[in-house]
Image (tube, helix red, strand yellow):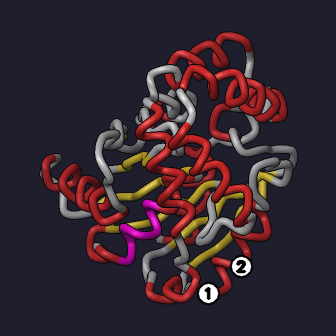
Amino acid sequence: MLIHVAGLDGTGQLFFKQAPRLALAHRVITFRSREHGRFTYEDLTDDLAAIIRNQGEQRGTIVGESFGGTVALNFAMRYPRMVERLVVVNSFPRFRNRLTIKLGAKVASGVPFRLLWPVRRAASTVGLLVDGVDHDDRRLFWRAISTVSSEAYARRLQLIEALDLEPRLSEIQAPTLFIAGDRDLLISSVKEAYAMAARMPNARVKVIKGAGHACLLGSRVRLDNLLADWDETFL
């Protein structure tokens, strides 16, 4: 079983480019993250554990993207026996630009969502173009993220602001693959991937040339091929 943990959008709908090919060899699960109240990483990882149990499984391959990567890392620490393998895409253990994340969390908490939408759309468009996401797929992207509430978006930014997993990364024993795009405009994904892998006993890094933060929506990353290649060395 392979479970995708969504990024900041939390919709579970933006795995559509990868899921069909992965489903040929894996049971693929996507889900919408909780959106209301002052939820914590503990809540989000408990939700993930419940999904695995409800599927009648004891463990699975966890694929966490961006913010979802931080959830996946937390999950591997809290529920190590439920992680068969860990795949972390364009993520981080601590957001380095402290001023940006503090400002983002504060603005998202206090500004009506309709006023933030033009800014989010402009920023996301640049990232989608870097990854060569075509027109039809961009429409699916906008449709999905338009359903995200300002409450959920702000709370996820608050969680990122308080996050610091670096001291505990060595606790993660599960085989881990870090995937990083070398044209990520949001975070220094390659640098973060190598730094995290250096702290973990069973981690490796795959850098994707020309890929950005939205690489799972583009054509440069095929998770089915990457996992198949990893299987050859993992098994």
Q: Is residue 41 left or right of residue 154?
A: left
The residue wearing badge 2 is 195
For the residue labelled by badge 1, is the local secondary structure a helix, a strand or a loop? helix
Residue shown at 78% from the left, 44% from the top: 212
User: Cα distance, mark 2 to mark 1?
Assistant: 7 Å
In the displayed image of the protein, which residue is found farthest to the front?
Answer: 110
Which mark, residue 173? none
Q: Amino acid at mark 2?
A: Ala
Coordinates of residue 6 in the picture (x, y in percent):
47, 43
Q: Amino acid at mark 1?
A: Arg
Q: How many marks?
A: 2
The answer to whether residue 29 of the structure is visible from this angle is: no
Question: Compared to 202, does 184 lie above or below?
Answer: above
Coordinates of residue 159 in the picture (x, y in percent):
47, 60
SS assignment for the magenta stretch, majority: helix
Residue shown at 24% from the left, 60% from the top: 46
Which sits in the foreground, 224 or 7?
Answer: 7
Magenta region includes residue 97: no
Magenta region includes residue 76: yes
The answer to whether residue 19 of the structure is visible from this angle is: yes
Residue shown at 75% from the left, 64% from the top: 97
The residue wearing badge 1 is 199
Residue span colored magenta: 71-77
Coordinates of residue 52 in the picture (x, y in percent):
22, 54
Question: Compared to 139, does 214 lie above or below?
Answer: below
Q: Is residue 51 left or right of residue 152?
A: left
Q: Is residue 19 left or right of residue 2?
A: right
Verify CB contact (< 8 Å) between mark 2 and mark 1.
yes
Which sits in the foreground, 24 or 183?
Answer: 183
Counting other residues with Cα less than 10 Å from the Cα at mark 1, is it few (<14), some (14-19), or many (20 or more)? some
